[in-house]
């Protein structure tokens, strides 16, 4: 059994988890977040969402320590439930990771085109009213090729990029937030809520799973931990990721609300957040800084999601939940090379769909993360942990059930439309087809710990 390279440390896990969590969505949907909750409603919605995720983060930390398998939720569920349930869980989680890749690739074209308008030419076609430009597609494809090649080379190169991009991005966020603090007014925060306080918090809380999902991706790289890495640091990395994401959204929501009245954010504009800062500072350099920050965040998110999705795809194949060809490991680089190439090719193909078709699938991706978290909590409960662990698992089951129901129940504001149901049906159909390609004469491979002991 060929193992993946074991080189990751605590900082690497944090950077990868934060990279999966924070991409360009904060720039694209900030106006929507403020319309949902208002400044205080948004801050409280994110705070509530992050705090109630902490017990789920604890569950994941314990699961990764006990089952250090790149299949993540699929492996946890596979210990206690039938293979079909294990596959369905892993397939739903794969959606939330893999779809972020083309989303970020498309965002690269939009952001660069905003800074360099000459790139918004040579329209190829329109999808749902959105123009698809040749330079945008070319830039997205080029970025996909570069990051796929980087990940093919090895996890060390990928982790180095994640750390550099993460801390560069955080530094840039501090700079533009401080710049905005000199030109805004506290009066811009009012009214604090967009609806009634409770409804405002609920509407923001609905999107928190999508915007702060990523802490669980730590488990997808569990097999690549350095030999000196302590198991308890998995929990540390997960908790750090959740709190870093929360603080980041606190800063961005506060900064945007401070520089301009949040009701004035024009959702018809491509990047209303950048426009608000430009009007407040009466300078274009702040736009360049914000968009540059977004490009750095885009690279870190794209790279981290390639890592997470390729590891999940590889490990599901190794467990015979998918075609066995995806479990190939490069003999020298010790990377899941076949899965990385598959993710890169799927990303390149999906770029041509355009943003109009990706948005409904992203809504499904928000629910898919909650499904994976629920399955992980159910698996941990079946492990019969101590009372604290059982309480965390039960809490996680309750919270994730609520997260799923608020999107599925038709009388709850912000529920699925028929577009999301169609997207979910298509993804389920693809899953059934993928499941049918698994090996029929499969013989289980030795457990990771058994294999390590044998070596």
Image (tube, helix red, strand yellow):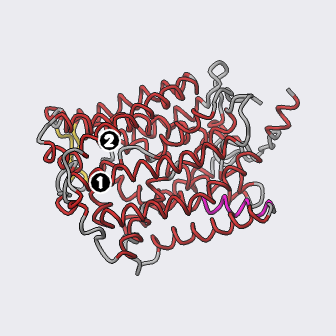
Residue visible at 71% across and 44% down in the picture: 439
> Which is nearer the eye, 121 or 215?
215
Say if the magenta span includes residue 316: no
Q: Position of residue 34 (x, y in %)?
A: 29, 62
Q: Is residue 107 visible?
A: yes
Residue topped by disc 1: 356
Q: Where is residue 91 in the image (x, y as percent from the top left)?
A: 58, 53
Image quadrant containing the N terminus: top right
Few, some or many residues within 10 Å of mark 2 (<14, 14–19, 20+): many
Work out which residue is located at the far bottom of the displayed protein and give it: 411
Q: Nearer the viewer, residue 431 or 209?
A: 209
Identify the element where label 1 is drawn.
helix
> Which residue is found at the position 63% from the left and 65% from the top?
396
Relative to residue 18, is residue 291 drawn left or right? left
**Magenta residues, dominant SS class:** helix
Q: What stretch is highlighted in magenta?
A: 373-383
Q: Using the image, determine if residue 197 lies above or below residue 143.
A: below
* Position of residue 171 measured from the top left corner of the image (x, y, whole percent): 38, 34
Query: Would you identify the image quadrant in which residue 68 lies?
Result: top right
Residue at coordinates 43% horizontally, 45% vertically from top-left? 22
Q: Disc 2 designates what residue? A: 106
The reply to whether residue 136 is in sight is no
Above or below, 167 against 435 in this view is above
Is disc 1 surrounded by few (<14), some (14 to 19) or many (20+) residues within 10 Å?
some
Q: What element carries label 2?
A: helix
Could you say which quadrant of the image residue 86 lies in? bottom right
Q: Which residue is drawn at 73% across and 40% down?
A: 231
Which quarter of the figure is the C terminus placed in?
top right
Looking at this rendering, what residue extends furthest in the right direction? 454
């Amino acid at each position: 059994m060929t193992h993946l390279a074991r080189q990751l440390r605590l900082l690497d896990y944090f950077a990868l988890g934060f990279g999966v969590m924070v991409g360009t969505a904060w720039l694209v949907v900030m106006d929507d977040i403020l319309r949902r909750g208002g400044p205080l409603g948004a801050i409280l919605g994110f705070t509530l969402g992050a705090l109630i995720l902490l017990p789920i983060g604890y569950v994941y930390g314990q699961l990764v320590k006990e089952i250090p398998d790149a299949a993540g939720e699929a492996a946890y569920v596979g210990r206690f439930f039938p293979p079909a349930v294990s596959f369905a869980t892993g397939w739903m989680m794969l959606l939330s990771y893999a779809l972020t890749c083309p989303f970020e690739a498309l965002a690269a074209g939009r952001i660069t085109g905003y800074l360099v308008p000459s790139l918004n030419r040579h329209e190829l076609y329109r999808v749902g009213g959105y123009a698809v430009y040749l330079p945008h597609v070319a830039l997205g494809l080029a970025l996909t090729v570069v990051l796929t090649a980087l990940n093919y080379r090895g996890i060390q190169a990928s982790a180095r990029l994640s750390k550099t991009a993460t801390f560069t991005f955080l530094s840039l966020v501090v700079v533009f937030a401080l710049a905005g603090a000199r030109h805004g007014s506290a009066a811009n925060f009012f009214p604090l809520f967009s609806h009634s306080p409770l409804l405002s918090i609920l509407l923001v809380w609905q999107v928190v799973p999508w915007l702060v999902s990523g802490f669980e991706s730590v488990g997808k790289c569990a097999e690549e931990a350095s030999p000196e890495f302590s198991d308890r640091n998995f929990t540390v990395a997960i908790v750090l990721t959740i709190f870093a994401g929360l603080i980041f959204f606190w800063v961005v929501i506060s900064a945007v609300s401070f520089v301009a009245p949040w009701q004035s954010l024009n959702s018809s504009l491509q990047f209303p957040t950048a426009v608000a800062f430009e009007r407040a500072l009466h300078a274009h350099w702040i736009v360049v800084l914000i968009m540059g920050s977004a490009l750095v965040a885009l690279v870190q998110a794209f790279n981290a999601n390639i890592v997470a999705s390729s590891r999940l795809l590889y490990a599901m194949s190794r467990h015979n939940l998918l075609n066995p060809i995806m479990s190939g490991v490069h003999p020298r680089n010790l990377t899941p090379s076949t899965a990385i190439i598959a993710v890169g090719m799927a990303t390149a193909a999906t770029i041509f769909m355009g943003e109009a078709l990706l948005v409904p699938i992203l809504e499904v991706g928000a629910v898919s993360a909650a499904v994976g978290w629920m399955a992980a909590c159910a698996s941990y409960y079946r492990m019969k942990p101590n009372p604290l662990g059982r309480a965390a698992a039960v809490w996680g089951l309750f919270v994730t059930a609520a997260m799923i129901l608020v999107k599925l129940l038709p009388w709850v504001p912000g529920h699925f439309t028929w577009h999301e149901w169609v997207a979910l049906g298509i993804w389920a159909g693809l899953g059934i087809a993928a499941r049918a390609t698994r090996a029929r004469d499969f013989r289980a491979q030795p457990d990771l710990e058994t294999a390590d002991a044998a070596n």
